[in-house]
């Protein structure tokens, strides 16, 4: 083989490497998500080069395509000349076409693009400075081709600016799951992200303290009544009413009483009452949390569609939906369900229906209730008496005891066969 032919082989090898470099660069630079581009730019100069290239995608693509076509055409021309000398004019062009096609496909396209698709960030950081310099060298040619491209796109009604698809909720959830699998984020962080999206859809009536469970103080309010309420409930804020919750006067903050030097009179306590925040029961949890934060409160009254008091919500209740139950040393603990035997339990009336379904491995239909007590009341259609029972799916729920109009505890029995949904009175109850 002559020195000239060896030179041709060297040029062909350089063109192949250059083609692979440019092809892989295109895949890597386009494949990095936009949010990662900003992160890379904050970390290093190479990352800033990536951001500069991505800021002008038309120019970047024109540069890469011009460079790639130049080296590919040069490779084809050199290979044709080489093989004409080696095998003659009749077969030389055909052999050159086959050899160059195979070499460029394997080493100039498939291999580098596969590598770049698998490691886009690492690949892009390596090639970005070189591609940026190349784009400046080829800028005149690239701008001409980019202008022609924009003109052609304009003829068919496509704008030349870069259009990005908005990131959806599903996209963020999927990224969080991938981050958890890859060890980038913790499980609790992924759960908080999932919970955050649900807060924008769920109404506060699902997490509020229902009307029957609200502990209120009746006017005239005395210090003895406040002390008794605090001793029994441990709450730090109480609604104050004239007769019932529909005659709400204001909210009493116990810490306001601590600022007084002497034992306050009922009239002095009245002057400490604060106007409560009132929210419709359809307000979403996220909106309620924002409203409470904006108005620098920690509690709000939930109103039904007729303007009556439906329940009460606190910032603690709302945050618990995001990060889990928050308890201090005065909290009585989460609503419990205690097993009696393999197919029977004693459940707190405040137990969420989702937890009941999970523990008993049964299916409970959706409805206007969030707790076991709410489920029972919805099926019974009235305030029950101890001993009353309802059946839902394979579960039989029996009221054990009441606290005024509130169901305190229930017995839950799982039956072998599914039954119809309905209610049955207990002994002494009026059907």
Image (spheres, rainbow, N blue to C red):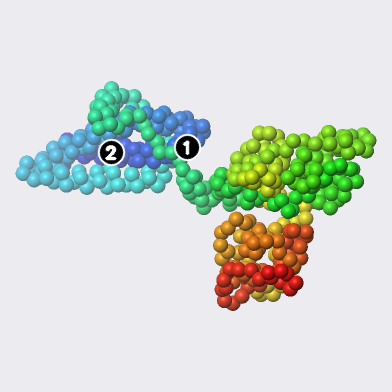
Q: Residue at coordinates 31% horizontally, 39% vertically from top-left?
A: 23
Label 2's element? helix
Q: Which residue reaches farthest bottom?
A: 416
State the residue position of label 2: 19
Q: In which quadrant is the N terminus drawn?
A: top left
Residue 333 versus residue 200 in the image, above or below = below
Q: Residue at coordinates 50% horizontally, 48% vertically from top-left?
A: 173
Label 1's element? helix
Q: CA distance from mark 1 to mark 2?
A: 28 Å
Q: How many marks?
A: 2
- Position in image of residue 126 (x %, y %): 41, 36
Nearer to us of marks 1 and 2 is 1
- Position in image of residue 368 (x %, y %): 60, 55
Q: Residue at coordinates 68% horizontally, 40% vertically from top-left?
A: 278
Q: Which residue reaches farthest front?
A: 430
Q: Residue at coordinates 60% horizontally, 68% vertically from top-left?
A: 422
State the residue position of label 1: 35
- Position in image of residue 78 (x %, y %): 17, 36
Q: 280 or 297, which is in the foreground?
A: 280
> Does any portion of residue 20 appear in the rendered image?
yes
Q: 109 or 365, which is in the foreground?
A: 365
Image check: 342 left or right of 124? right
- CA neighbours of label 1 inside 10 A, class few (<14), some (14 to 19), many (20+): few
- Sequence order check: which comes first, mark 1 or mark 2? 2
């Amino acid at each position: 083989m002559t020195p000239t032919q060896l030179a041709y082989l060297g040029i062909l090898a350089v063109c192949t490497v250059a083609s692979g470099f440019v092809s892989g660069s295109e895949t890597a630079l386009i494949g990095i998500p936009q949010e990662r581009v900003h992160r890379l730019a904050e970390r290093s100069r190479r990352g800033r080069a990536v951001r500069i290239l991505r800021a002008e995608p038309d120019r970047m693509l024109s540069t890469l395509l011009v460079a790639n076509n130049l080296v590919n055409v040069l490779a084809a021309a050199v290979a044709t000349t080489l093989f004409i000398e080696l095998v003659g004019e009749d077969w030389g062009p055909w052999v050159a076409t086959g050899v160059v096609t195979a070499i460029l496909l394997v080493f100039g396209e498939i291999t580098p693009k596969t590598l770049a698709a698998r490691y886009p960030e690492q690949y892009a950081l390596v090639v970005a400075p070189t591609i940026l310099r190349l784009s400046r060298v080829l800028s005149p040619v690239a701008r001409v081709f980019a202008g022609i491209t924009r003109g052609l796109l304009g003829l068919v009604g496509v704008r030349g600016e870069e259009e990005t698809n908005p990131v959806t909720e599903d996209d963020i959830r999927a990224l969080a799951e991938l981050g958890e699998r890859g060890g980038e984020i913790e499980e609790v962080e992924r759960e908080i992200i999932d919970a955050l999206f649900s807060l924008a859809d769920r109404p506060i009536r699902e997490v509020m303290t229902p009307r029957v469970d609200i502990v209120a103080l009746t006017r005239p309010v005395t210090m003895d009544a406040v002390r008794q309420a605090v001793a029994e409930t441990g709450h730090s804020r109480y609604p104050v009413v004239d007769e019932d919750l529909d005659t709400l006067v204001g909210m009493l903050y116990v810490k306001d009483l601590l600022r007084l030097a002497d034992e306050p009179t009922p009239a002095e306590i009245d002057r400490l009452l604060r106007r409560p925040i009132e929210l419709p029961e359809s307000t979403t949890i996220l909106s309620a949390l924002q409203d409470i934060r904006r108005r620098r409160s920690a509690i709000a009254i939930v109103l039904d569609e007729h303007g009556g008091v439906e329940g009460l919500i606190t910032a603690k209740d709302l945050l618990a939906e995001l990060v889990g139950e928050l308890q201090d040393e005065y909290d009585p603990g989460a609503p419990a369900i205690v097993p009696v035997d393999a197919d029977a339990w004693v459940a707190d009336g405040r137990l969420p229906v989702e937890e009941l379904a999970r523990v008993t491995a049964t299916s409970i239909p959706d409805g206007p209730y969030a707790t076991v007590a709410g489920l029972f009341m919805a099926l019974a259609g009235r305030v029950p008496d101890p001993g009353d029972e309802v059946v839902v799916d394979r579960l039989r729920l029996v009221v054990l005891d009441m606290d005024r109009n509130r169901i305190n505890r229930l017995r839950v029995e799982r039956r072998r066969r599914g039954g119809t949904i309905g209610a049955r009175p207990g002994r002494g109850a009026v059907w």
